[in-house]
Amino acid sequence: MAPPDPQPTIVIVGLGPGGVEHVTAETLTLIDRIDRRHLRTAVHPSAHLLADAAGGAVAHDDLYEAADTFDDVYAQLTERLVTDAQEHGEILYAVPGSPLVLERTVRLLRERSDDAGARLDIRPAMSFLDVAWARLGIDPVESGVRLVDGHEFSSGAAGDVGPLLVAHTHANWVLSEIKLAADDATGDEPVTLLHALGTPDEQIVETTWAEMDRAIDADHLTSLYVPRLDAPVGRHYVRFHELTRTLRERCPWDVEQTHETLIPYLIEETYEVVDALQALSDPDRDEATADDDLIEELGDLLYQIEFHAVIAEQEGRFTIADVADGIHDKLVRRHPHVFADVAVSGTDEVLSNWDEIKRAEKGRTSVFDGIPRSLPALAYAAKVGGKASKVGFDWPDAAGAFEKIHEETRELSDAIDTADAAETTAELGDLLFATVNVARHVGVDPEFALRSASDKFRRRFEAVEVLAREREIDLRASELAVLDALWDKVKAASKPS
């Protein structure tokens, strides 16, 4: 009778934090004994111990290149290991550091092994923690240090102020996201970057919370020590950022989007925020409902901003942390009356200083530089006229601007008489531009004024439709005189008594 097939077994060892001097004798013995070997990654100073052994080893770095997320990497690697153990009986799986410290594949193998009928044999190893405590000169138990995964910092460190040792800070964008998670940090808090511990390239870099993502070129051997933050780590915004990244990675629609395809949604969401803001002053709207609507619309707009930042992050161009840092620093620069010793007499001087600072920053040569051509036409006209006014090219008051309306009206009438479509278009544009200049002089937003007039016309015409139905009048079949009579009736009823 043949002996039963041996139970599939995955022997898991750790390669320590760096050089071969940190690899245990037990691990070396297992490398020699088990000829079916796997490396989570060959990017480790001691990985050659398996690669150089008889029969070599299978490294799984290809998954990091092909998979969309780290979760996908670990899930696919787990399946590979289980399948290989089922086929060959016993395999060796080597991970950086210790298999018992922040090793997600070990966590997944524990969950998967019972269903697969496989046995795990996890051997202890030296981790980067042992070297880290020595370099930091602390007792982690007495100091109460918490170990946190850099990919889960916002939730793992939520409500904590430190001390924290953050692992898996393998890229500068990870450090940026960690920095963003502590939205109440001052930026001056001291932190220590621990790089390539236990190797000839070891670096211990003392820096600050604000500079930690710029102080070193982080890689898979980088970790972060945070002695103490002034405020607990917040997670609301970062949780939202992580959700945006997840949707970008897993939702087919989100994956297909580009900066260009999202432009219509950005514009639409912006206008919906404007509608929600205007609804706040509507006496017929419940205040709580209006607030809820504004919260929702601001969230939709924020998602568009996050979406663009995540696309840029995936392209390796910038992250949401860069966006936040950029606007923060710009606002500080442009408010010297708040953050420096500049004195101002009022709003006009604030705006004047703003324009001067902006011009110096951008190196602009024209007063029109920086005006987006994609603005709505009325808003664009108001910006252009306003910029020209700031250098003195303007009427002294509304009277001159109003006279320009009369002039452009006559020129439009003449163009219409000639039946020249191009000339008519040009003169109509001049008339609209003149009207916008009058609005600017009298302190009225032309975009708001036209929108209000359009809404008023819509409300009155909807009332005309109701009145026509009550009187059984077919609007489409009626003469203009009938429609005018209905309009006058509605207009009179809408005037205040």
Image (cartoon, rainbow, N blue to C red):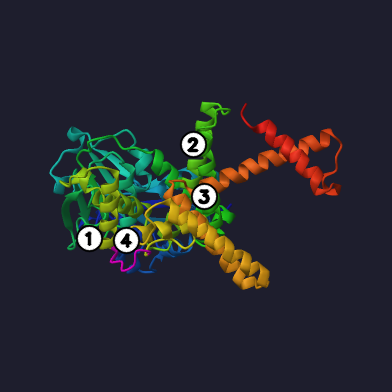
Name the residue at 19% across, 56% down: 198
Question: Element type at marker 1?
Answer: loop
Q: CA distance from mark 2 to mark 1?
A: 53 Å
Which quarter of the picture shows residue 409?
bottom right
The stretch in magenta equals 362-368
Residue 295 is tagged as: 2
From the top left corner, tell me how far across and down residue 431 is, in percent: 54, 60
* Residue picked out by circle 4: 391
**Residue type pointed to by label 3:** Glu
Q: Earlier in the sequence, mark 2 or mark 4?
A: 2
* Residue picked out by circle 1: 19
| Quadrant containing the C terminus in the rendered view | top right
From the top left corner, tell me how far across and down residue 87 is, in percent: 53, 58
Residue 86 seen: yes
Q: CA distance from mark 3 to mark 1?
A: 67 Å
Residue 447 is tagged as: 3
Name the residue at 29% across, 47% down: 348
Q: CA distance from mark 1 to mark 4?
A: 68 Å
